[in-house]
Image (cartoon, helix red, strand yellow):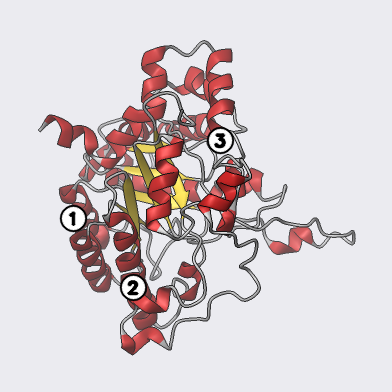
């Protein structure tokens, strides 16, 4: 029997890279200029599926490099067989730190090309695996070339930083050709923790008392004070995309905010609508919006709650079209039984079969453009 007992897509999973992995996909001209793989970070390696099976360990109990399919695509397929997910979005974890914040744009975009090759290759052998490529908006011409390369490789989603790039808002009109190509390709953008600041300013940890320990596995090393502010950068990104008209100009553009939680979404949607109603008289650009701001989010963006968040309550508050099931496999943030925890929350709120289907499958298909492929 599989872990999940229904049709299900997983909107967040990861690779657990190792030293030298990314360099194998990089052009010689930038290979030696990539930052070294983070030292002292890889531990707990036990990549034998057979050894874990002999110990009777469920797939979601082993984490990080010890998890089946952490870096081996054949093992990931075996893991999906056991888990029962029909689709799984796959992000990198550590290799992006070797290039994505480089001031040298040759290194930044060369690293992204290398990573996109690696991600596409990892997912190529199994239709259930959906690869996430990365593109920086720091330089529009390079961004368009990088995007075209990623789409040609077959990347299924494009990870965009939730911060300004090149001194411009992501909603700057100069970026319209980028959003137009994504819309035309039917591929979503995704925001995710890691590509830009998420954690609280480190000064807040300087309290004169012992610092809390973190845990290894997700690459983010979150602590308790980080979680309440995790979404702030994503709020700024989405606010710009809505109020500056990107979703108005590109109504078929889809996106997702992954691994930033979702308990904040109801308040955000209300605040977004207040922004237009309160400031609309003084900001003529807001009059160009044909919808209420929150309705653009409902139409075009999805969110992944953490497994400890009350997804039943979220659906009660905002409807069934906004939220996605995810596991964060094989990172520890996903917990050992995300499906069980989500099911308990949905049951407690008496969420019906149709709305559950949206959470587990249809919202993912809408974001990824699979619903249009299926019909047409």
Viewer-closest of 87 and 180: 87
Q: Earlier in the sequence, mark 1 or mark 2?
A: 2
- Residue annotated with mark 2: 114
The answer to whether mark 1 and mark 2 are in CB contact below 8 A is: no
Q: Quadrant of the C terminus?
A: top left
Q: Earlier in the sequence, mark 2 or mark 3?
A: 2
- Residue annotated with mark 1: 181
- The tag on residue 79 is none
The relative height of residue 40 versus residue 314 in the rendered view (above or below) is: below
Q: What secondary structure is marked by label 1?
A: helix
What residue lies at 58% left-to-right and 52% top-to-bottom? 51
Q: Picture coordinates of residue 180 (x, y %)?
A: 19, 53
Is 7 displayed left or right of 66 in the figure? left
- Residue annotated with mark 3: 264
Is 306 displayed left or right of 12 in the figure? right
Q: Picture coordinates of residue 368 (x, y %)?
A: 28, 41
Q: Earlier in the sequence, mark 1 or mark 3?
A: 1
Viewer-closest of 267 and 309: 309
- Mark 2 surroundings: few (<14), some (14-19) or many (≥20) residues within 10 A: many
What residue lies at 32% left-to-right and 65% top-to-bottom? 116
């Amino acid at each position: 029997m599989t872990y999940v007992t229904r049709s299900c897509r997983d909107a967040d999973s990861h690779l657990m890279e190792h030293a030298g992995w990314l360099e194998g996909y990089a052009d010689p001209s930038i290979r030696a200029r990539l930052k070294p793989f983070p030292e002292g970070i890889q531990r707990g390696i036990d990549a034998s599926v057979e050894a874990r099976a002999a110990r009777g360990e469920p797939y979601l109990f082993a984490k990080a490099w010890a998890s089946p399919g952490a870096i081996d695509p054949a093992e990931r397929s075996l893991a999906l067989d056991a888990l029962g997910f029909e689709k799984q979005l796959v992000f990198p974890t550590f290799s992006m730190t070797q290039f994505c914040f480089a001031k040298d744009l040759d290194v930044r975009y060369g690293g992204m090309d290398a990573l996109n090759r690696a991600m596409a290759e990892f997912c190529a052998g199994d239709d259930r695996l959906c690869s996430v490529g990365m593109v920086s908006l720091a330089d529009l011409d390079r961004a368009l070339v990088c995007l075209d390369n990623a789409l040609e490789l077959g990347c299924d989603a494009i990870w965009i930083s939730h911060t300004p790039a090149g001194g411009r808002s992501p909603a700057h009109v100069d970026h319209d050709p980028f959003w137009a190509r994504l819309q035309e390709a039917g591929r979503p953008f995704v925001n995710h923790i890691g590509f830009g600041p998420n954690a609280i300013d480190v000064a807040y940890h300087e309290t004169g008392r012992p610092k809390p320990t973190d845990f290894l596995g997700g690459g983010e090393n979150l602590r308790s004070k980080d979680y309440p502010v995790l979404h702030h950068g994503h709020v700024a990104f989405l606010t710009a995309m809505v109020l500056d008209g990107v979703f108005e100009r590109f109504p078929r553009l889809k996106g997702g905010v992954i691994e930033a939680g979702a308990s904040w979404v109801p308040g955000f949607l209300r605040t977004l609508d207040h922004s237009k109603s309160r400031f609309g008289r003084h900001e003529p650009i807001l009059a160009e919006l044909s919808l209420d701001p929150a309705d653009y989010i409902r139409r075009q963006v999805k969110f992944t709650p953490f497994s400890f968040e009350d997804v039943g309550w979220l659906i009660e508050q905002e409807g069934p079209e906004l939220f996605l099931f995810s596991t964060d496999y094989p990172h520890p943030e996903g917990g050992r039984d995300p499906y069980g925890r989500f099911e308990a929350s949905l049951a407690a709120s008496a969420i019906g079969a149709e709305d559950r289907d949206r959470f587990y499958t249809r919202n993912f298909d809408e974001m990824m453009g699979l619903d249009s492929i299926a019909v047409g």
